[in-house]
Image (tube, coloured by chain):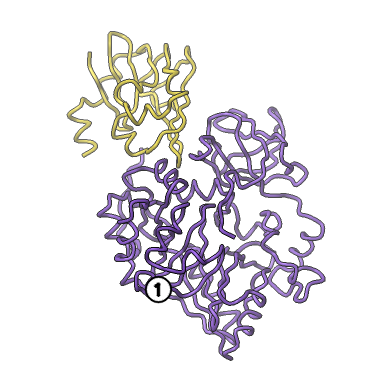
Chain colours: A yellow, B purple
Amino acid sequence: MTTLFTSDHEWLRIEGDVATIGITDYAQSQLGDVVFVELPKVGRSLKKAEAAAVVESVKAASDVYAPISGEVIEVNDTLTSEPALVNSDAAGKAWFFKMKIADKSELGGLMDETAYKAHTA
Amino acid sequence: MLARDHNRSLKRTPLHALHTAQGARMVPFAGYEMPVQFAAGVLREHLHTRAAAGLFDVSHMGQIALRPKSGSLESAARALEQLLPQDVVALAPGRQRYAQFTNESGGIRDDLMVANFGDHLFLVVNAACKEADEAHLRERLSDVCVVEPLEGRALLALQGPKAEMVLAKFCADAPDMKFMDAGPRKVAGFDCFVSRSGYTGEDGFEISAPSDDAEQLAKLLLAEHDVMPIGLGARDSLRLEAGLCLHGHDIDGSTTPVEAALEWSIQKSRRAGGARAGGFLGAEIILSQLANGAERRRVGLKSEGRAPVREGAPLFADANSETRIGTVTSGGFGPSLNAPVAMGYQPTALANPGVQVFADVRGQRLPLRVVTTPFVPNTYKR
């Protein structure tokens, strides 16, 4: 299992040909109290960099982009009823959606944890 | 997502060092570096203000003294009445009222507070408009008044149900003040101007203090168990729940006080048939709208779902209509209501409570219901 990161502050956990996607702890701390999450529909085919989900704090709405291309195979409905989970467990229970990876070569452009830490330093 | 650079050209308030020491996240706002939130975050800051007391730095706002050259306050009050549709002449000493500077077309140049301080008028105006307001006052009133921007003063707001109890420790007659009482008071020995007002819907006070004393005063208030520092984020969600307008968003030079549903702030004496009817910029349009109504009106909008509907969202009469009827001017999440709230303009025919309209949010039509404001009842001590 590998965890990768984007410069837009999303994380991807790669297990076989499935990627689980969420936003990083840094991202949630910047957003502040999350009050609403909108998730993509299961079955939706996403292109890399396409707006896939929305996360809203009291003050503002932010897009969550598809870090890679692929089909949405599962979404975390808990976030719809408990958006504050994004603040309390961004890297764990507050995953947003799972994708079937369309093209593994797209993973090559993402950061590992060390590179991401340098990116947010 | 939200990285921001600090801009060295931004102005700082006298509380800047204190904010930084308290872990504020600073952002540019109206030319100032201001705290958008502290460590507690917008949600807790908002709820704390409604439950106990919050301390806000609003020193970026403009404080202006208007002094009559003749020595007679009535001459200054009459002069100021040329620029706004409110009654200033009848404003009693020690009292304050909400007002709007209008333009020739009846629009709102800025909204403000005017207080009668006995020998002069004291004005508090929005930060983004203060230079323009000062120029406007000088251009129009210089024959009669000296326009004196009070640069050397900070402005603090102490808001919430515990505000009275807290301020009473530093200002013995604070509890005797009623909503919109205003005047010079000693607070912790400092020479302040105190008004029982604010912009959160809660009971509370605004305290103008000399810049050199502001940090010490803020520290004394923050040392009280009930008081938490509050940033601009919660200030915005509190005023939105209170149904109060934000200039530049809900009101501006293109919206009249009648369209903005601010008729309550225009006294009879300035309306048709009143002792000093009209005689202010844009009076023809505003008096006509007071008599006949305006075509559009600001309304409160409550969402039936969980998705916040934000500023700029177009409004439609039904779920499929192509014809836009209006626009959301302020919107977000109301922490006390635990639900989204918004305000916007739409045709007066659709402005009655209960009417359903739809907002377009990311390509989806979300149902909204027109409701009376405030969304959260205010708790002013009248």
Q: Is residue B120 left or right of residue B224?
A: right
Please state the chain letter of the residue tagged with numbered disc 1 in the rendered image.
Answer: B
Along the viewing direction, whichever of B333 and B256 lies nearer the viewer: B333
Callout 1 environment at 10 Å: few (<14), some (14 to 19), or many (20+)?
some
Image position, residue A66 (x, y; %): 39, 23
Count of residue discs: 1
**For residue B274, above or below residue B167:** below
Q: Is residue B76 left or right of residue A7?
A: right
Image position, residue B363 (x, y; %): 58, 29
Image position, residue B74 (x, y; %): 64, 83
Q: Is residue A22 left or right of residue B242?
A: left
The quadrant of the rendering that contains the N terminus of chain B is: top left
**For residue B40, above or below residue B142:** above
Q: Can you tell which quarter of the image residue B259 is in?
A: bottom right
Check disc 1 and give the amino acid type.
Lys
SS class, disc 1: strand
Q: Residue at x 55, y 42 (%)?
A: B331
The quadrant of the rendering that contains the C terminus of chain B is: bottom right
Label 1, on which residue? B186
**For residue A61, above or below residue B28:** above
Q: Is residue B41 left or right of residue B334?
A: left
Q: Can you tell which quarter of the image residue A45 is in?
A: top left
- Most extreme residue toward the left is A114
Q: Can you tell which quarter of the image residue B109 is in?
A: bottom right
Image position, residue B25 (x, y; %): 32, 49
- Most extreme residue toward the bottom is B70
**For residue B299, above or below residue B194:** above
- Most extreme residue toward the top is A16
Along the viewing direction, whichever of A44 and A90 lies nearer the viewer: A90
Along the viewing direction, whichever of B380 and B122 lies nearer the viewer: B380
